[in-house]
Image (spheres, grey):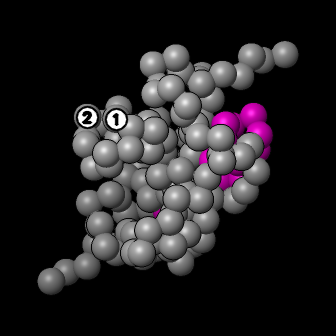
Amino acid sequence: MVLVKFPTHWPVGCPPTAAVEANAVIYRVTKTNPATARDFQSQAELGRQRSANQCLRVGISVFGSFRDVSHCQRVFPKLGRFIAQAALKPRHGKMQTTPSQMFPAHMTWWPYENVNRSEPFSVITSVEEEQH
């Protein structure tokens, strides 16, 4: 049996008690096809301070709908040209809906330590960069 645990360096109480076992189809914008580990780094791993909530910073931003991930890709084209989809299972970690006004289907995924984050994902579409 594989021991499932979260990284010990994460903030105390992270993931939050409201997070549930992963068991959903989710989407993420990626730079590469196929998606690689670099496509699944948290804001904390990237050294970014976009959220004051330290628990959200160590999680991975994903979306619960194709429409919302497509919207995110249009709003933030530098995130990548591809959209990847995965059917996460409890062995992948925990997740919670963390919506914003701009992205109502935004979710945060907290993968267990040693989970291959890119493994369950397959690129399902790409967007050609628009010429302006």
Name the quadrant containing residue 64: bottom right
Find residue 79 and report its horizontal and vertical position in percent: 32, 57
- In percent of the image, x 68 and y 37: which residue is there? 92
Q: What secondary structure prevails in the magenta region?
A: strand
In depth, the one of 117 and 103 nearer the eye is: 103
Count of labels shown?
2
Q: Does the stretch in magenta take in 86? A: yes
Query: Neighbour class for label 1 at 10 Å: few (<14), some, many (≥20)?
Result: some
Secondary element at image label 1? loop
Answer with left or right where residue 47 lies relative to residue 123. left
| Nearest to the observer: residue 42 or residue 13 | 13
Q: Is residue 114 magenta?
A: no
Image point 44% across, 59% down: which residue? 29
Please state which of residues 88 and 123 is positioned toward the viewer in this rendering.
Answer: 88
The spot of residue 26 in percent (x, y) is 62, 59
**x and y percentages locating residue 23 in the rendered image:** 76, 51
Q: Is disc 1 in contact with disc 2, using a CB cutoff of under 8 Å?
A: yes
Q: Which residues are magenta?
A: 83-95
Question: Which three-letter amino acid code belongs to the residue tagged 2?
Answer: Gly
Amino acid residing under circle 1: Ala
Q: Please say if 97 is above or below 35.
A: below
Residue at the image position 35 percent from the left and 58 percent from the top: 80
- Left or right of 31: which side holds 111? right
C-alpha gap between disc 1 and disc 2: 5 Å
**In the figure, 99 relative to 109: above or below?**
below
Residue 3 lies, in percent from the top left, at 74, 16
Residue assigned mark 1? 44
Residue 125 visible, this orientation: no
The residue tagged 2 is 47
